[in-house]
Amino acid sequence: MHKEHHIDLVPGDAAETVFLPGDIQRAAFIASHFDDAELIAHKRQYITYTGTYKGVRMSVTSTGIGCPALSIAIEELIHVGAKNFIRIGTCGALQEYVKLGDIIIATAAVRGDGTSREYFPLEYPAVADFHLLECLIQAAQARKTNPHVGIVRGHDAFYAESVLANKDWLALDKPWIESNVLSVENETPTLFTLSTVRKCRGGTILVPSGHHLFPYARISDEDLQAAIALETKIALDAAVLLDKLDKK
């Protein structure tokens, strides 16, 4: 049977719901929260585990960094049967009221990436799937968490627009800060546009690990890991809620 060129999967290897972290190690961390998980494939930066959680089959595939790599993963995962995509990641906060370690659930994304522009004109909106968005919010609230819900920004050049940049990143961030964009990261615009056009669902949950307004602010490794664990549990719970919704 033909395997997908990059992710090395065949139909049936992946569940309908797939979590999309960037980091290979984070994929293993997410899979460790499943009730059972099996390593299915590992090729390049793409590693996939499939298992179950609360009786629902689900998968996790690492995508690497950026929208080009993410688009490859989504296209090939759709070929093998995936329908729901939840990005679990980190980001840089843009608003003063967003703190390091908070939970952000994206409703839409500013399309600062190049990949989605190769697919669709800029007039095409990058929005989360409504039902998946509601499931993420409900799952967060059930875990006594009050997430920030709103627009995020995705772009390609990390070192041109981050606290590690060698230029005035705040000058680049100014329009987005003034527009109440919650954070900046590198994958969500393509996730939202591509999943919508392919008649799938896309959602994003993020934890700020840095802050553009407070570049010297730090979060301990322990607190960051706890926040990532929380967003992971919220995403898994949301997948269960989505499964129940579909079965209705």
Image (tube, rainbow, N blue to C red):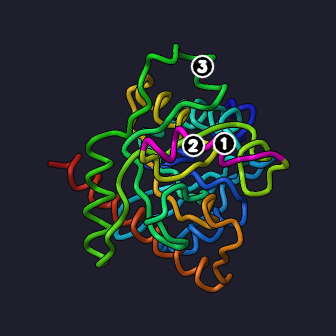
Residue occupying image coordinates x 27% and y 41%: 130
Residue under pointer 2: 174
Q: Is residue 126 left or right of residue 213?
A: left
Callout 1: few (<14), some (14-19), or many (20+) C-alpha neighbours within 10 Å?
Answer: few
Nearer to me, 144 or 210 = 210
Q: Which secondary structure type mostly characterizes the magenta part of the structure?
A: helix
- The answer for how far apart the CA atoms under marks 3 and 2 are is 22 Å
Residue under pointer 3: 117
Q: Is residue 81 left or right of residue 70?
A: left
As shown in the figure, which amino acid type bears the numbered disc 1? Ala
Q: Residue furthest left?
A: 248
Q: Which dot marks residue 171?
A: 1
As shown in the figure, which amino acid type bears the numbered disc 2? Lys
Residue stretch in magenta:
167-179
Vertical placement of residue 7 versus 123, above or below: below
**Considering the numbered disc 2 on the image, is that residue within a helix, a strand or a loop?**
helix
Task: Answer whether residue 193 is magenta in the image.
Answer: no
Q: Which dot marks residue 70?
A: none
Q: What x and y, as percent, mark residue 219?
A: 63, 79
**Considering the numbered disc 1 on the image, is that residue within a helix, a strand or a loop?**
helix
Callout 2: few (<14), some (14-19), or many (20+) C-alpha neighbours within 10 Å?
Answer: few
| First in residue order: circle 3 vs circle 2 | 3
